[in-house]
Amino acid sequence: DQQVKQNSPSLSVQEGRISILNCDYTNSMFDYFLWYKKYPAEGPTFLISISSIKDKNEDGRFTVFLNKSAKHLSLHIVPSQPGDSAVYFCAASETNDYKLSFGAGTTVTVRA
Amino acid sequence: KAGVTQTPRYLIKTRGQQVTLSCSPISGHRSVSWYQQTPGQGLQFLFEYFSETQRNKGNFPGRFSGRQFSNSRSEMNVSTLELGDSALYLCASRLTLAGGQYFGPGTRLTVT
């Protein structure tokens, strides 16, 4: 059973605009959330994370928002750049069980 | 510091055969995790090893097994291959069980 869901398999956005990627989870024990970015022929690379004690974390053009009551998180990329075209995975884990559960991924395409 | 390396990068096997994949973690990292990536399923967790002991296991049949050596290198074995085992197998390492994961480029396994 998929505990982390990314319901949008793809997203197309114009360069310079905002990209919003969404992620939902079902396990209320999850307390640490991460976003990974993956280019073809490479392994995923860590992008940004957030702990459940916060509702927002920002790193440059990337901001992650967490809504614990809705079991929902989102990744905002502003402004979107062509190099942001990749597959983005949402992941979650719970304290003392460090196994990461991943979503199916969202393919982002940034159009010039 | 060298990143996570995986060998081989590409592999073609036939149904019923077995395969062994290898992963060398970042120097000093004691944890190695394995994931299976298939289209639409995202990254499915297989297992994690820490200091030669399996610490966590995903929901995969017993045909999937792994081990970790004293130098932290890890191998994953799949016996009696099925067509559905065709996937990208990713290995990730981290310093501790609570640390961030660094992924290798993956091994693309095709079962015919």
Image (tube, rainbow, N blue to C red):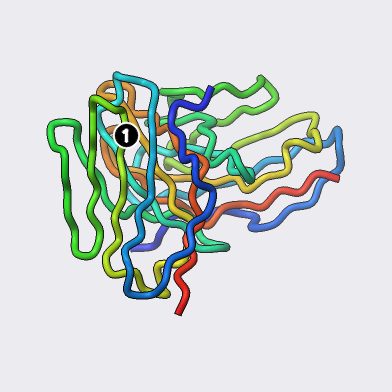
On screen, residue A67 versus residue A42, left or right, reads left
Residue A40 seen by the camera = yes
User: Which residue bears the numbered disc 1?
Assistant: A72
One can see residue B75 in this view? no
- Choose top left, top right, bottom left or bottom right for residue A93: top left
User: In the rendering, at what x and y percent does residue B50 appear?
Assistant: 38, 31
Say which residue appears at 35% left-offset and 33% top-offset: A92
What residue appears at the point 66 percent right and 21 percent down from the top-left corner? B61
Q: Quadrant of residue B29?
A: top left
Q: As displayed, is residue A111 above or below residue B112?
A: below
| Amino acid type for the residue under numbered disc 1 | His
Q: Of residues B88 and A112, which is closer to you in this image?
A: A112
Residue at far left of view: A53
**A39 above or below A105?**
below
Q: Element at badge 1? A: strand
Residue A52 in the image, given as x and y percentages of width and height: 19, 31
The residue carrying pointer 1 sits among few (fewer than 14), some (14 to 19) or many (20 or more) residues within 10 Å by Cα, namely some
Query: Splitting the image into 4 quarters, where does residue A62 fall?
Result: bottom left
Total labels: the figure holds 1
Q: Nearer the viewer, residue A91 or B106?
A: A91
Q: Quadrant of the C terminus of chain B?
A: top right
Specify the subunit that label 1 lies on: A
Instruction: Give the residue at x 49% y 34%.
Output: B68
Q: Residue A4: x and y, percent?
A: 43, 32
